[in-house]
Image: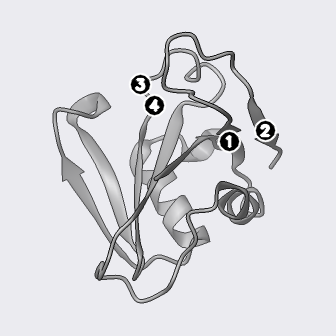
């Protein structure tokens, strides 16, 4: 599983628009909106590749939200319903997204820990 945090141009700021842009750039055509209390505003969007599930949501990590208000989770998934093969390598995903105007941050180390030092790599749009 991998995660990247993203920022988008102002005109795409709704989660639905952000997810649509991400899925288009990653060439995912099988997508859906899903609801869960585990997510900010209780919803997120999921796109399917043959081998990966891509989840786009509002970020709930207060260390990231001022600069990167959205996050993308990349989960390996056998026999997902998508038609294309997709990598979960964050640097390759970042290259696809930045080409479409999305700014990306790939955290390094144990970013989910409270004592995380904020290390990571930024990819400019």
Q: Badges 1 and 4: C-beta atoms under 8 Å apart?
A: no
* Vertical order, 63 against 67 (above or below): above
On screen, residue 31 above or below 7: below
Residue that carries the numbered disc 4 in the rendered image: 59
| Image point (41%, 77%), residue name | 51
Cα separation, mark 1 vs mark 4, equals 14 Å
Quick one: which residue is furthest to the top in this view? 115
Alpha carbons under labels 2 and 1: distance apart: 5 Å
Please name which of the two marks, 3 or 2, marks the residue nearer to the observer.
2
- Sequence order check, earlier mark of 3 and 2: 3
- Per the model, the C-alpha gap separating discs 4 and 3 is 4 Å
Residue where numbered disc 1 is placed: 106
Crowding at label 2, few (<14), some or many (≥20) Cα neighbours within 10 Å?
Answer: few
For the residues labelled 4 and 3, say whether their Cβ atoms are less than 8 Å apart: yes
- In the foreground, 109 or 101: 109
The residue tagged 2 is: 121
Q: Position of residue 88 (x, y in %)?
A: 56, 63
Q: Residue at x 48, y 86 (%)?
A: 84
Mark 1 or 4, nearer chain start: 4
Q: Position of residue 46 (x, y in %)?
A: 33, 60
**Real-space Cα distance between discs 3 and 2?**
19 Å
Say whether disc 4 or disc 2 marks the residue closer to the N-terminus: 4
Instruction: Tell me if mark 3 has few (under 14), some (14-19) or many (20+) residues whose alpha carbon lies within 10 angstroms of its own.
Output: few
Q: Nearer the viewer, mark 4 or mark 2?
A: 2
Horizontally, residue 93 falls left or right of residue 72, namely right
Residue 60 shows which numbered tag?
3
Pointer 2 or 1: first along the chain: 1
């Amino acid at each position: 599983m991998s995660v990247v945090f993203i920022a988008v141009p102002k005109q795409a700021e709704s989660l639905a628009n952000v997810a649509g842009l991400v899925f288009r750039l990653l060439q995912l055509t099988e997508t859906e909106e899903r609801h869960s209390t585990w997510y900010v505003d209780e919803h997120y969007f999921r796109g399917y590749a043959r081998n990966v599930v891509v989840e786009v949501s509002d970020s709930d990590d207060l260390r990231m939200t001022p600069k990167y208000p959205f996050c993308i989770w990349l989960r390996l998934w056998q026999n997902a319903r998508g038609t294309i093969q997709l990598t979960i390598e964050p640097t390759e995903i970042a290259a696809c997204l930045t080409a479409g105007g999305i700014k990306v941050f790939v955290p390094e180390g144990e970013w989910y820990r409270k004592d995380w030092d904020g290390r990571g790599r930024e990819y400019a749009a």
